[in-house]
Amino acid sequence: MLFRTRTLLPIGLIAISTFVQCSQPAAPELPKYIGDLTVLQSHGKLRVIVPPEPIAHIPKQAEPVTIDYDLARNLAEELKLELMLVKAENYAQMVQKLMEGEGDIVAASLTITAARQEQVAFSVPYLYVDEYLITSASDSLPTTIEGLAGMTIGVRRSSSHYETLLDIQQQVPLLQIHTAPEKLGLEHLLDGIVRGEYQATVSDEHLWRGVESYYDNMVTPLRVAENRPIALMMRPDDVQLKTRVDEYLLAQQFTRQSQQAFTDDLPGLKERRRLRMITRNNALTYFIHRGRQVGFEYELIKEFADRHDLRLDIVIPESHADLLAYLREGKGDVVAAAMTITEERRAQTSFTLPYNEVDELVVVRAEEDSIASLADLAGRTIHVRPSSSFYTTLTSLADSIEGLQIASLPDSIETEDILAGVEEGRYDITLCDSNLLDVELAYGRRLKAAFSIKLTSLGWAVREDNPVLLAALNQYVKEEKGGLFFNMMKKRYFENKRTIAKAKDSLRVDLSGRLSPYDELVKKYARQYGQDWRLITAQMYQESKFDPQATSWVGARGLMQIMPVTGRELGFTDLHDPEENIHAGVKYMSQLVNRFDSNIPIEERTRLALAAYNVGYGHVLDARRLAREKGWNPDKWFGHVEQAMRLLAKPVYHKRARYGFCRCGQPVHYVGNIQNMYDAYVGMLTMARASGQERL
């Protein structure tokens, strides 16, 4: 592929930049220490080793150093540590600072190579790049690897490009490698070409794009390596840190689709086959119990989504105050969070017909006998969130009740936690909806309703410019409100004591920090085979609902539903043993992922592997071939291979498929459900971590 290049970077500017940097006073020596994540947490800092900042006039959006700095900031925020940047001029200096305890992670757009892996540990890749030959424009440019014979190419010995050229040299012995000084950056290497010290150099594509506008006399006629993995570098013994970093990077890749913003009405959502429900995690609306997504609001919207053949995605903002903002910004499609319809909210969005009516109650401790009316609230303090409808109610009453104090609580806190605070005496009084108080009383809270302020209506919110979705939801409410399904859900979540107990027990993910009873085993083997443990757990739930004794009608067994013949091929026989079964399932998934071309991004390879796990590798190959015929992307699952898989269920297509007929709707739902569950798991574990519940 031929890239046109632009003007020469003025050497004077480089000299000025170098002089300014050299004239700075020496930074004080930082304390050195080596340790895993717990040690870093005790110091409260994440020390990230990075290259020097880019020269000011180079366009930052293309500059890889900017990517490194952004990644460092995001990681520190994810780990809840203060970021400290440690500058290093070259690879050797980076490794030295890392191993001697001056830093904890290296973020420098480093390529994973076999030689480097003998010395340090790498995260999962966060970027894949191609390496290109850069040389002066001329009439005779090399366009094949063989065309490099007789050329002298300048690179640093510590760079991945040196290893690339060594490999090429085995095929092209007449290729000459000029070893450049380690301190030279890409601009200096390019200037070496101008000075005639060598004929060409090699660079990662994204590095080259950061400076190409300054070198209009140079071109990139040949790609010498493709899809080289870029990753973060760490000490080999820092296992906890690597685990957390890998989890973060994988989640960024696997949840990328769910983070896209769009404001489609129902027809557009049907094209995407997705409906995003914006909600909060609590006993009333949505939570995860033993791997399963549950909750009153969740069940109602899930039923609506199923009727319209839409996959339901869950979006949980950081606070209640963000619910409507997320809707406006296109981060979700419907707010279903037990939201009271108020005039203030109507001014911001459209509400459906009310699907439930509740009393707005004044709630006190069970032994409180002095409050029976609004007048009795004089001189008392009521604790509520400012974004809640309760706050609006109280501000309208404040002038008529002498001495009434309204205490604002953080908008991230749930009403169930406020009620716990009232029971424990941390808060004086609060307001809540009658249905939630019913749940808390059934759970055993020592609380009571002093009196009702008013009857209110709950509705679902959609964007004002989504009339088709609004009409469909209204029709759904008209048909179902007071009907069998709605009444069943009300009894399940507000009257059934077993369901209420589930909303409070230690198997609720956000309260326990655990996804399943098998988290440690899944983490162990996911780490061994380079898989994301949260994805494997989502797959395990899809396969067996965490039942180690599960056996399917075709004979698949255990937590990961392994066929006996597959188990024997993998070296496992006791498939009802949780550890053997998990080990077998993760190993098999790893093999499937590796059967797909490494040029395909890891998240897409994994989705293709999930489909193969469900329906067979051959049928996925058929779907990819059909996707290519249809002009779709054979390397992308959602909206591409997924669509082709649906077509393979039709005789006109499966009759000419190499691997014949399959129940091809099955893998479509399988992959979609696992992606949905994975997104939910990542969100819940983030919440658990924020509240100090997640286990390392």
Image (cartoon, rainbow, N blue to C red):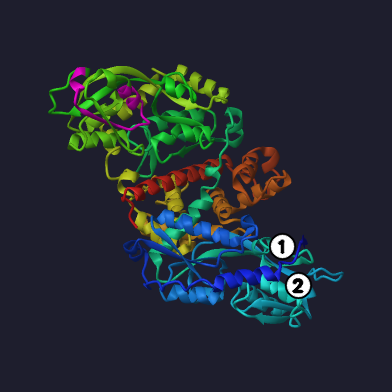
In this view, 420 is above or below 86: above
Q: Nearer the viewer, residue 502 or 325?
A: 325
What is the C-alpha distance between the residues marked 2 and 1? 23 Å
Q: Is residue 136 visible?
A: yes
In this view, 320 is above or below 613: above
Examine the structure image and report whether residue 241 is included in the region drawn in magenta. Answer: no
Q: Mark 1 belongs to which amino acid? A: Glu
Q: Nearer the viewer, residue 208 or 438?
A: 208
**Is residue 675 shown left or right of residue 411?**
right
Q: Which residue position holds label 2?
A: 145
Residue at (55, 76) in percent of width and height = 115
**Is residue 362 shown left or right of residue 289?**
left
Quick one: label 2 or label 1, which is nearer the N terminus?
2
Q: Position of residue 470 (x, y in %)?
A: 52, 23
Residue at (19, 22) in percent of width and height = 378
Q: Which residue position holds label 1?
A: 212
Residue range highlighted in magenta:
375-395
Q: Residues within 10 Å of mark 2 (few under 14, many from 20)?
A: some
| Rendered image quadrant of residue 104 | bottom left
Q: Quadrant of the N terminus?
A: bottom right
